[in-house]
Amino acid sequence: VEAKSSSKAARLAWLYRHPWLLILGSPLLAIAHTVFIIGCWAKVAIWEPLLMLPLSFLSVTFMQKDLMPEWMQTVASFNPVNWAVEAGREALSASPDWAAIAAWSGLLAVFLAASLLFAVRAFRAYQRSV
């Protein structure tokens, strides 16, 4: 450790003498940082990251469907993120099954229409209340 001041004392020398503080403090700081970030998202009403992360983990984005537990396979079959991933992977395969791609895309179109209908109704209800 090189000296950083005129007194030849190393900065953060206490950390080198007590590395267990870093080992014990890192998980606690990681949890605190996570809570802080989620709190900031909630404060400004940005809910998309809080929704997308669980939906991504409950799809075939990170794991083959055959390796998932049964309950995750059931959830994945109703998950729009899973539909998009399945359609994209099938479209990029060597011999794409266009019927499957059309089915996944159709499910996504129905979900889009339902979401759009919900959003329009929510905005109209908000406009009436203001």
Image: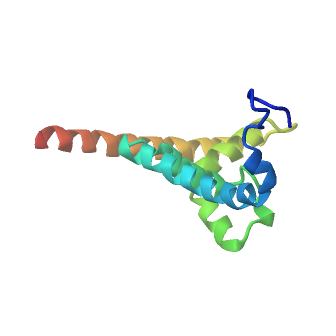
- Measured as percent of width and height from the top left, residue 87 is found at 69, 42
Q: Nearer the viewer, residue 24 or 74?
A: 24
78 sits to left or right of 1: left
| Visual colour scheme | rainbow
**Above/below status of 40 relative to 3:** below
Kindly tell me whether residue 110 is visible in this rendering: no
Kindly tell me whether residue 93 is visible in this rendering: yes
Residue, x 43% and y 44% (percent of image)? 40
- Measured as percent of width and height from the top left, residue 102 is found at 64, 41
37 sits to left or right of 44: right
Q: Nearer the viewer, residue 74 or 50?
A: 50
**Above/below status of 14 relative to 66:** above
Residue at the extreme top of the image, as rendered: 6
Residue at the extreme front of the image, as rendered: 7
**Above/below status of 14 relative to 77:** above
118 sits to left or right of 95: left
- Measured as percent of width and height from the top left, residue 76 is found at 63, 60
Picture quarter with the C terminus: top left
Picture quarter with the N terminus: top right
Residue at the extreme bottom of the image, as rendered: 70
Residue, x 76% and y 60% (percent of image)? 20
- Measured as percent of width and height from the top left, residue 46 is found at 42, 41
Residue, x 80% and y 64% (percent of image)? 66
124 sits to left or right of 37: left
